[in-house]
Structure formats: C-alpha cells, structure tokens
Image (cartoon, grey):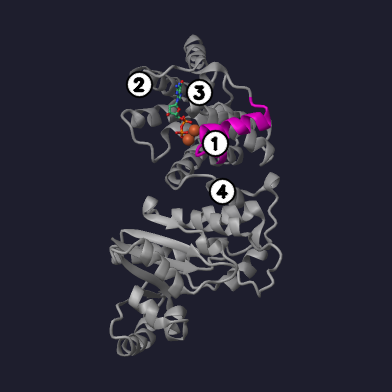
Amino acid sequence: MKIGIYGGAFNPPHLGHITAARTVFGLLKLDKLLVIPTGHPPHKLLPPGSPAPEQRLELARLAAEQTGLGDRVEVLDAELRREGNSYTADTLARLKEQYPEDELWLLMGTDMFLTLQTWHEPERIISLAGIAAFGRTEADMEELFSVQRSYLYRTYPQARIFTLTIPGVVEVSSTELRERLAKGEGGRLLAPAVHGFILREGLYGTKADMKALPLSQLRPVALSYLSYRRIPHVLGTEQEAIHLAERWGGDVEKARRAALLHDCTKKLNMEEQMLLCEQYGVVLDELEKRAPKLLHAKTGAAIAETVFGADEELASAIRWHTTGRAGMTLLEKIIYLADYMEPTRDFPGVGELRRVCYEDLDAGLLLGLEMTIQEMKERGAPIHTKTLEARDALKGQR
Ligand code: DGI
Ligand code: FE
Ligand code: FE
C-alpha cells in the first residue's frame, strides 16, 4: 500500500488543504491518506474562540470527508491528544511500525518543504518516507523547488521527492483566515460544511445567531450536519424548492430554509434519534418505532424549531416531508416534492413526475404518493398510514 501522511495544525482546515490532499492522493496513486492534526503548542497562549482538541478533531474530520475519498482517508487523533507538538520523525517511526510493509509519503506545502533540512532529524524523516511537496504557483515550482530538490538529493542520496504545482489552490495563511473569520468574512476559503461547523460552535470569534441565520450562513451550517454524499441532494432540494415555490406562489425564502434543514438529522443512528425524541418530546407512532428511516423527519422538525428558530409552518414542512399527510399546506407539498424529484434524483418515472408537478401541483403530489406506495409494496415495507391518508384525501378531491 502507498500511504500519504498529512500533518498540520489545520486551524482551521481550508480549501487549500482539501484540494492539496485530493490532488496528491490522485497523482501519487495513494491507497490511503492519514490526516494528523498536531497538538497545541503548550507555550502559546490561545486566544478566545480557539477550538478545543475535540473541536479541532471534528474540523479535521469534516474537512477530510470533503476530499470525497471516503474511507480511504482517516483522521488520527494521537498527536492532538498529546501535550504540544511531536517530532515528525517520531510520528513517522511509529507509523512505520504500524505499517512495516507499506510505502509512506509525507505531504507538505512550500514553506515546509523549503526548510526541511532544519527540522528535527531530517535524515531520519527522509529515510522513513518519501516527500510530496506542493506549491501554489509555477514560480514556487521552478524558482524554489528545483534548487531545494537538488540540495536534498545531494545531501540525502536516499531521498524520494515528488513536487507538484496545484493550480487554483487558495493562497491564505491560517492566521489571516482566522482574522477574516472574526470579521465575518473568509467563508469562501473554507468547505461549506467546515465553515458551518465553525459558525455553529462560534469558533474563531464568529458570532452567528443560530435562531436568525441569513440564508448565506444557514446553508453552510445545514451542510455541516450532513454526510458528504447527502450534500448534493440537499442543495438540489433547495434548488427544486425555489423553482416550485416560484411556480406556485409559495414563500421562496421559507422553502429554501426548509429544504436546507429537511434532512439535518438523517445521518444520526437509531439510538441518537431516540435520544433527540426524548429530549424534544417527539411522540412516535408504532411504525416509526420500527422504521428508523421515518424518524429523521420528526427529529429534523424539532431541531429546526428549537435550534434554528423555525416557525410552525416551516417545521411542519420538515415533519411531513417523508410520509406526507392529508390536507398538506403549500409549503409541505413543495418540500415533499422537491425532496422527491430534485435534480440529483434518478429513478424511473422521475422525469414524468417533474413534468406533472409544474403543470398541476396536486396531480404531482398524488403521483409522488402513489409511486412511494408502489415502491414500499415492492420492497415489502409497511406503508405509513399518513401516506395512505394523504393519497386518499387527494383522490377524494379529484
Ligand atoms: O431522506 P431522503 O432519503 O432524502 O428522503 P425521504 O425523507 O423521503 O426518505 C425516504 C426513505 O423513507 C426511503 O428509504 C423510504 C422511506 N419511506 C418513505 N415512506 C415510507 C418509508 N418507509 C416505510 N416503511 N413506509 C413508508 O410509508
Ligand atoms: Fe428525508
Ligand atoms: Fe431528503
């Protein structure tokens, strides 16, 4: 196996880190990437709003997930739990013990690469791992990298070095980024989910009011609750909800908010869902106790209300987005259908459903409900009574 090792303060992890990790992973054809956030230097007094070790770990995990590498990327918390920084040479030696048969590659940016000979035991580092250095511009590469490369090859003949330019990598220091975040800027230099976590936790001097977030902040915050693969679905639902609300005279802003939050508890497991139900007094019916997929609509509505200050109309659109119910409000219909047929959905009949929804909303809703009922029958899954009632009520109207 070829294993990449990417250490750093990641305080916070930004788009530059994510792009570099993904690019080096692809070009070196790595099999695995270990991300290692370093410990807090004990001599440094941390400014207020500095993340605690658990928060830095979560930031690194969220950022690692955004590389899209799935379970090929892993965040190690060993260094973070240690007091102060550890030497890279020691970290590599430990990893070499753990992976004796594997090829290790140490990832680093320009500044680190250019000062490698001044690190603790550079020779040991170079004997344990190849060096994968990335720069942001051609100038980094040609004028600086080549000189350093020849120097290292001369000094450490066993060195393996791979240098590359990553165009489009953002040029920002973490210090500057933290200053910008404190002023309410800099979000565009972060993956949205990472930015959302920072806002949620009020890190780096951000002071977002969770109960009154503007859409530009609600979006990253909402995305920070999702698994990486669900993000396109939720953004698609927002887009479809805008379109449907415009078509049928709904409240576009509310539709967007509901869409962004509709699956905010989806990644929680049954136990976590049940805990939320207890906490927020969510009452479950018999089927919901057995079908965990149905639970997230109710817990999502509770979170929208209590954490994000959603009103009853908005919360109710989230509450009924999975099953539907008889006598749905316009917003409930919009969210139910946007969730079902947003652009990233792909199943037989979705094209027809989209067409009908923009021609006759209730006809679209009836079609959506009937398709769900049919699918549940085929899967042999119990059908929620609310779904049957919703269909019957619509049929009775027509
Ligand atoms: O959360 P999403 O995946 O975006 O979509 P959703 O909230 O509509 O959830 C869909 C899931 O819920 C899908 O796996 C099927 C399940 N589901 C929907 N209606 C019923 C149902 N499961 C049962 N057992 N009975 C239903 O009536
Ligand atoms: Fe859902
Ligand atoms: Fe959904």
Camera-nearest label, 2 or 1: 2
**Separation (CA) of disc 4 from disc 1:** 12 Å
Residue indicated by mark 3:
323
Tell me how far mark 2 sits from mark 1, CA to CA. Answer: 24 Å
Q: Which residues are magenta?
A: 261-282
Residue reaching furthest to the top: 396
Please tell me which residue lies in front, 318 or 151: 151
Q: Which residue is mark 1?
A: 262
Between discs 3 and 2, the one toward the N terminus = 3
Classify mark 3 as within 8 Å of ligand 1 or not, answering yes or no.
Answer: yes
Q: x, y percentage for residue 103?
A: 30, 67
Residue 65, compared with residue 175, is above or below; it is: above
Residue that label 4 marks: 219
Instruction: Measure the C-alpha gap from mark 2 to mark 4.
Output: 34 Å
In x, y percent, where is residue 122? 41, 82
Residue annotated with mark 2: 379
- Left or right relative to 139: residue 101: left
- Cβ of mark 1 under 8 A from ligand 3: yes
Residues packed near mark 2 inside 10 Å, few (<14), some (14 to 19) or many (20 plus): few
In which quadrant is the N terminus drawn? bottom left
Q: Is residue 277 magenta?
A: yes
